[in-house]
Image (cartoon, grey):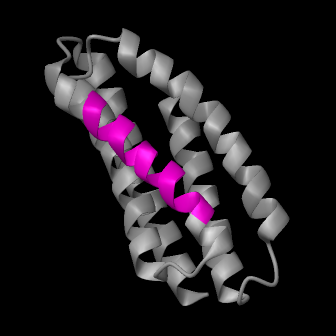
Amino acid sequence: MTGYFIHELQKERGLYSGYIGSNKQQFKEKFLNQQKIVNKYYKKTEKIILSNNSFNKSAKQNILSNFQKIQNFRAKIINTDISFYIAIEIYNTMINELINSIDDVVLISTNYKLSQSLSSYISLIKVKNYAGIKRGLLN
């Protein structure tokens, strides 16, 4: 579930970039709809994270507080000017915290096959995230 949440948050970040890049003339509806999708996946991910002892307390708190930052600045994005770089940094922080939370599970897992699979999955997510950032900056 965390992977889906990360993916949807990456899509929101990309739509935000397109929205700002078009001087707030395009992508507004897609951006707002994507926020709803992200919220849905966040709720599912939050339940998993809070009920799972594989995530340490610090990782849980970071994820929850970073998502709150996103909620707080979303209204500013639509209604006022917010620095593109600050907004992208907030998105990137949240995404990286989620990726790191999966990485934490690998570190404490005693199941070798699970750890190996999760390590590969994390590498794929990191590469995909990096490519998305680069693609967004080029647009």
The quarter of the image holding the N terminus is top right
The quarter of the image holding the C terminus is bottom right
Name the dominant secondary structure of the magenta segment. Answer: helix
Q: Residue 66 lies in magenta, yes or no?
A: yes
Dividing the picture into quarters, in which one does residue 91 lie?
bottom left
Q: Is residue 124 visible?
A: no
Residue 124 drawn at (x, y percent):
43, 49
Image position of 11 (left or right of 112): right
Q: Residue furthest front?
A: 79
Vertical relation: 108 (above or below) 31: above
Residue 4 drawn at (x, y percent):
58, 37
Q: Residue 129 lies in magenta, yes or no?
A: no
Vertical relation: 33 (above or below) 39: below
Image position of 107 (left or right of 103): left
Q: Nearer the viewer, residue 121 or 32?
A: 32
The residue range painted magenta reads: 60-75
Question: What residue is drawn where x is 27% and y is 42%?
Answer: 100
Q: Nearer the viewer, residue 99 or 25?
A: 25
Dividing the picture into quarters, in which one does residue 63 lie?
top left
Vertical relation: 79 (above or below) 66: below
Vertical relation: 119 (above or below) 24: above
